[in-house]
Image: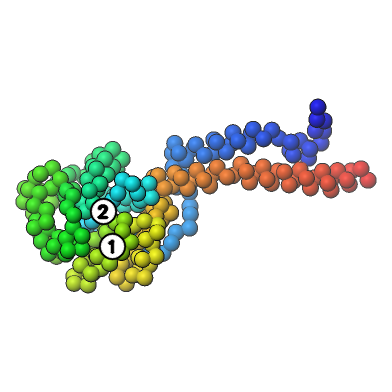
Amino acid sequence: MSEKPTTFWEKIGKIDYRWLYALSLIFTIIPIIQPLGLPIQVSEGTIGYFNAIDKLKPGSVVAVSFGASLALLDEQEAQYLATWKMLFQRELKVIFYCTYADSPLIIQKHLGSVVKPENYGKKYGVDYVVLPYAPLGEAGEASFAQNIRGVYPNDIYGTPLDQIPMMKNINDQSAIDLVIFMYTSCTDVEWPIRQWVVPYKKPVIVATLGCCGPMAVPYYPTQIQGFLSGSGMGTEIEIVSKNPGPGAMMSDAKNLGILPFILFFILGNISYLGRRFVTKEVKK
């Protein structure tokens, strides 16, 4: 049998290691149950993205080009949810138009069960509208900017746009105040620049995968006003906008879960130094 620790220094050096695992588990679970939104370092691209939305005047119209993939949702979900919450927290008119086959499934699920526009006092057809999947490509983006009804005569539920109150005076790019371009193919960042920024001088912000960030950086802050790339910047926009979600949950769990290990590391070193130097002084 090992000797029972007698001094304070020996006791803190021999704390049962199971406490370490228990504390780490508890600290990890807390933000999973309720994300805390702990402060993190925020990049310039994220700040620009936030400011582009935050400075919009009440009644402004935002067009969200939503090209999302279920296979890549884990990397961009935080971007989507934080962005949509920001839009619904403000007095804006939002047009979601789906450009990938998976997009309608994602947007209907998340708007229906996670973001819930009605919780922000928003009404479908008055404050926002969702347009169905259309394989736009760059040519389709150009067509949408020139004639929305030419690309989308009906909304996702089959209702003609002419019967939707919000769309009464929204026909083309002239009514759009901001374009949010969400995509998964790295070179697609050039599409909104060529079809929205250059011909119409419309402000554009983009959200994409982490690997596509380097393609967006050269266009910031002149051609695009801000950008998000990957789950890291998705977490940043959650924190900046005060809308903690899946990104903040993972970030908080990682940061809090490591604290018990740091604590035990410190206690172990204190125990070692105490036994080596303090105990030695007592013996003298």
- Tell me residue 175's x, y (percent): 15, 62
Asked where in the image residue 216 lies, by quadrant, the reply is bottom left
Q: Nearer the viewer, residue 132 or 262?
A: 132
Q: Disc 2 on helix, strand or loop?
A: loop
Pinpoint residue 106: horizontal percent, then vertical percent.
27, 44
Tell me the kind of residue under disc 2: Gly
Q: Is residue 181 above or below residue 195?
A: above
In screen coordinates, is 24 left or right of 176? right
Label 2 sits on residue: 67
Examine the rendered structure and indicate whether residue 156 appears above or below residue 53: above
Residue nearest the observer in this picture, 219 or 214: 214
Q: Above or below — where is 3 with respect to 119?
A: above
Tell me if label 1 and label 2 are in contact, CB under 8 Å. Answer: yes
Identified at 44% across, 59% down, the residue is: 42
Q: Residues within 10 Å of mark 2 (few under 14, many from 20)?
A: many
- Residue at the disc numbered 1: 188
Which color scheme is applied? rainbow
Does residue 95 appear in this view? no
Q: x and y percent of residue 133 in the render?
A: 18, 49
- Which one is nearer the viewer's eye here, 28 or 214? 214
Q: Residue at x 24, y 65 (%)?
A: 191
Label 1, label 2: how far apart the Cα atoms are: 10 Å
Quadrant where the C terminus lies? top right
Which residue sits furthest top?
Answer: 1
Q: Secondary structure at mark 1?
A: helix
Amino acid type, callout 1: Asp
Left of 181 or right of it: where is 44? right
Q: Residue furthest right?
A: 284
Residue drawn 63% across and 37% down?
Answer: 20
Left or right for 175, reference 259: left
Residue 239 placement (x, y as % from top left): 42, 52
What residue is rendered at 18% in x and 54% in y? Answer: 135
